[in-house]
Structure formats: C-alpha cells, structure tokens
Amino acid sequence: MTDQATRLVLPSHIEAVADAAAAAADFARTCGLTDDAAFGIDMAVREAITNAIVHGNKEDDAKQVELTLNCSQNAVEIQVKDQGEGFDAESVPDPTAPENILKTSGRGNFLIKNLMDEVHWSSGAGGTTVRMVKKF
Amino acid sequence: MAELNIRERQAGDITVLDMDGRITIGEGSVALRSAVRRLLEEGKKKILLNLAGVGYIDSSGIGELVSSYTAINKEGGQLKLLSLTQKLRDLLTITKLLTVFDSYDDEAEALSNFK
C-alpha cells in the first residue's frame, strides 16, 4: 500500500459529522483496514468531530474543524483539529466509575481510547488537536 | 428517510418500541427521547426497546439510553432492552452499561420478566 493522505475542512454543524465519519471509514478501507477496524474508525472520528464541533467550536459558524487522514504501510493516522479555547483531556472523569455510570454524557473520549490503538490530545490557544492511530 | 424509525406496539401493559436505524447525536437521539417521554406522559411505564434494527449508536445515543432508563425508573417504571446487535453489545460492555440494563435476546422472556 502506498502512502495516501486526505484533508477535509468541516463546518461547525452537527450535520457534518456523519459524512465525515463515513469518509474516514471509506479511507481506512481503501488503505486496507478490515471492515471491523473501519467501523471503529467511523465511531472514533464521529466522537472526535462531535467533540470538536460541540465542545471545541461550540457550534460557532465562524469556526471550522479540520480532519486529516494519512495512511502508511503500518497504520492509519487521523487528526481532528478544532478552533476552540482548548480542553484538558485528563479532566474528563472515568465514565465507567460507579458514580458516573448513569451520567448521560462523557463517554466520547472513552470510546475513542477503546477503539483506537493510540490517542493523544494536545490543546492550546489555537484549539485542540486529537491524533488517533489505528495499526494494521 | 428518518435516521431512526420507531414503531410502537402493546404486549399487555408493556409497550414495545421496535427501532430501526441509528441512534446518534441529533435526529436519532431526539427521536428516542421524544418517544420515551411521550409514553411516560401517557402513563406507559413498562417499556421494552427492541434494538434488533439498530446497527449504529454513538456516545450521544448511549447517553440517551441511560437518560431513558433513569427517566423511566424515576416514574416507577421499567426499561428493558431486546435483541442487541453484537456491536451495540460490545459498546455497552466496554462502557459497563450491560451491568445496568436488563437485556434479553428472546422477546417472550423479556416480557415475562417485567414486574
């Protein structure tokens, strides 16, 4: 498989999430990942973009979300970048803890970590970037 | 076509919601919330969600299942899940929510376990 890359710029609308997640899954299949792995990428990208739009950009029409997809011989690497005020990934409580189990939100990052092989959040004044890797 | 189609039927005093589609942020989650809230307003507090046709759910959809569960319990009712797809079962397992929800593969067994 030769290296491939794609970059999408999305509006800060929830309606953009499904198509972007499907595009990421299609990209992963093209790179050679299995349907199951591509399904995981669909879900992880869906959660990351939802976070970027809702919590990062706060659905501000003036802000965008950048989705970058790269594939190499060993892995698919995905980055989702928002233009929000930044966010501390460590501050999100464990949604599986007994005191949080009946909370209605707070599971998105947990799912991303479970679906991908590597996940790293970096945050600053220019926004938050989540880098996710799924290995072959 | 709607993201989530919900068909309602009665089995005695139990309301079964046959769901087909996706429970995701936006339309799908709102459709589930609206259906459950409407049933509670009508005094229907025993609800079986048939999820056989739900092939995709995100964290918002999972949150809506939890919200439905707590809303129904608060009214003294019961919520049970029927026919989880493997992907949904996997998600509820890793989020430890399978320990919270009462779930069944057989409808007759699910119905007989309502009190």
Image: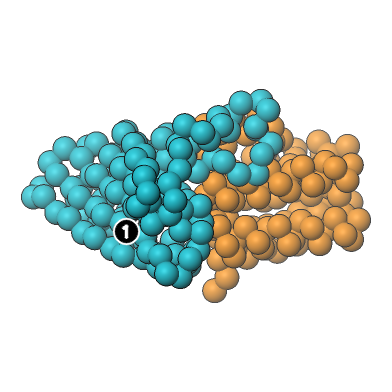
Q: Residue at 57% across / 50% down in the picture?
A: B60
Residue B109 vs B48, above or below: the answer is above
Q: Is residue B85 visible?
A: no
Residue B24 position in % (x across, y down): 55, 56
Among the chains, which one is cyan? A
Crowding at dot 1, Cα within 10 Å, few <14 / some 14-19 / many 20+, comes out as: some
Q: Quadrant of the N terminus of chain B?
A: bottom right
Residue A120 position in % (x across, y down): 34, 36
Residue B63 vs B104, above or below: the answer is below
Q: Is residue A89 visible?
A: yes
Name, please, the residue furthest toward the front: A125
Which residue was labeled with disc 1? A66
Q: Nearer the viewer, residue B8 or B95?
A: B95
Residue A37 position in % (x across, y down): 33, 43
Q: Locate residue A24: give its quadrant.
A: bottom left
Among the chains, which one is orange? B
Q: Locate residue B36: give its quadrant.
A: bottom right
Residue B107 position in % (x across, y down): 72, 44
